[in-house]
Image: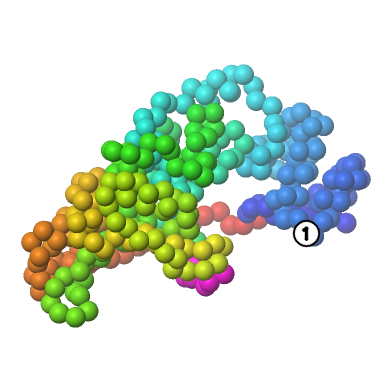
Amino acid sequence: MPAELKPWRRKVVISDEILEKLPKEVVQALRDSSLSDKEKLRALLQHLYEVFRSYIAVAALIGVPAATVYNWMIRLNVDIREYEACKERRLAKIKKVAPKEMAKMWFFAHSDGCAIAMGRQVYVQVRTPDPWLIHLFTELFGRHVDIKVKPVIDFDGGSNWHAWCYLPIEGYSWILSDEPPSIMTGEGLWEALAVLIDTEGTITIRREKRGKATEVTLVIPSENLRLLQRIKHELRSNGIKAKLGRIKETGQETKVGRLNSDCWRLAIYAKPSLIRVLEEVADRLTLPWKRMLAKLSLRVLREQLAWSEVEDLVSEVRRFRRRTLDVSKRYILEQLAENPPRPST
């Protein structure tokens, strides 16, 4: 009976004729229901490449375009030969990364972004309806490599921009590290913190529950506890008070499904600490509404403005953000209507 695999959109059928020529362990892997289609395909491609030493020959055998097979092999980390000329072209893309730039790139990849090793490359991506986050991604990574962006509809029905790039692993493996770059003091701290606020942070200006005063808070949620602990330590070294606590537990349902790990929150409430942080990051923020909220928060804290004095401004900033995202989502749908994605095969 033929084996059918659908690791991504394209389906590949392994005929009985091919199965008869495969080693017993490879056939067992293809029949193993406990393995995912990607794991089965990796076992098959690794064996076939070791036999033919050519991804073009492998592609011809299983009836899939050569470019698709090569892409699969890279994504599945199949050990394939690299010609010297190809290696030279790939390594030529490596550029020197300044310490502050390194911190900003790492923090983006470990917050709203995602970074994984894919063959000889580091694949970094972000999905968001926010065009300003796409701009920040392009600004950070675009100096090193070409950025690709396309409109997509995610599994939950959300309209997003999908931006991604591939970086040579020899020069950018530090992006994959669980530990943030060592440059986390002085300017590096504020540059990294600004990226984290742009991607994950929330600056809130609201009326106090009792009275007419205005309350300002800065909150950064993350599932990466070690990251928040490191930020808290560096902030404390700069005389800034921050509180760290768990807000959601593993397995808890959210808008995007069940959490795979606990979610934590780093929060700053104290007025002197808020002023110091916002003074350092306000002009480094990329998202316009967060930059506006940061500057407005500084005025509130310094001048002790009442809620009635800032309520309309806060509402205007929120309206601007909603309008920007609404327009962006509508444009995504228009782009998909004009150029619909290829149907699954």
Looking at the image, residue 85 lies above or below residue 231: above
At x 48% / y 54%, what residue is drawn? 224
Quadrant where the N terminus sits is bottom right
Where residue 164 appears, as percent x and y from the top left, is 47, 44
Looking at the image, residue 97 lies above or below residue 230: above
> For mark 1, does the 10 Å Cα neighbourhood hold few (<14), some (14 to 19), or many (20 or more) residues?
few
Answer with left or right where residue 323 lies relative to residue 10: left
- Magenta-highlighted residues: 251-257
Which of 164/230 is in front?
Answer: 230
Task: Single out the residue that lies furthest toward the bottom.
Answer: 210
Where residue 157 appears, as percent x and y from the top left, is 48, 67
Residue 311 visible here: no
Looking at the image, residue 27 lies above or below residue 169: below
Residue 64 visible here: yes
At x 77% / y 44%, what residue is drawn? 43
Where residue 94 appears, as percent x and y from the top left, is 46, 26
Indicate yes or no whether the magenta region holds residue 61. no
Which of 13/314 is in front?
Answer: 314
Per the image, the residue denoted by label 1 is: 34
- SS for dot 1: loop
Answer with left or right where residue 97 lies relative to residue 85: left
At x 47% / y 63%, what residue is drawn? 263
Quadrant where the C terminus sits is bottom right
| Residue type (three-letter) at the residue carrying disc 1 | Ser
Where residue 339 appears, as percent x and y from the top left, is 45, 53
